[in-house]
Amino acid sequence: YEFAPLSYLWALASCCLNAIYLTLVKKFSTANPGHSSDILFVNSAVTVPVLLSWLLASGHLQQVVQSGRLVNEASLLGALTLSTVMGSSLGYAQYRCTKSTSALTTTVVGQMKMVLSSALGVAVFGTKVESWQAA
């Protein structure tokens, strides 16, 4: 394996953006205590234009439409639906955790989840871990 600085840069960006997101969710949920569904709706609605812009700019949307797989393959549509439901559930769980505890607690729990997921990946898929990766 070779060191990939761009991967670490993306991981750092992900951590920073997640910290900002959790802090803002906590701040907005504290400022508007009875409006959980409003915050969740706005959070979901804001991501749609970003996703569509990326799909159009990358050409992936055109590839999917031209292939016809989205309409013709029930397994793809089922996987897309399941992925959407699971992602929404994860977002809701993260929101509820942040609202009922703190942004720091949610971040710590998230990191613990990543450690367990990595260990499970090594155990199930037999991924070889180098000493520099485990440090």
Image (spheres, rainbow, N blue to C red):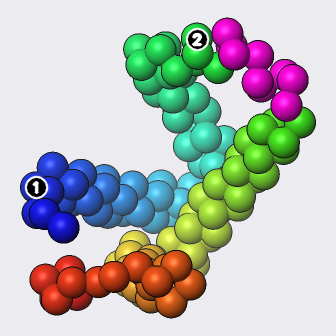
Q: Earlier in the sequence, mark 2 or mark 1?
A: 1
Residue 124 vs residue 99, the one in the foreground: 124
| Alpha carbons under labels 2 and 1: distance apart | 31 Å
Q: Residue at x 44, y 23 (%)?
A: 54
The reply, left or right, for residue 25 in relation to residue 83 is: left
Tell me the tag on residue 55: none
- Magenta-colored span: 65-73
Residue 63 position in % (x across, y down): 58, 16
Q: Secondary structure at mark 1?
A: helix
Q: Which mark is residue 62?
A: 2
Residue 20 position, x and y percent, is 31, 56
Number of marks: 2
The residue shown at (29%, 83%) is 129
Q: Secondary structure at mark 2?
A: helix
Q: Which mark is residue 5?
A: 1
Residue for point 67% across, 10% down? 66
Q: Amino acid at mark 1?
A: Pro
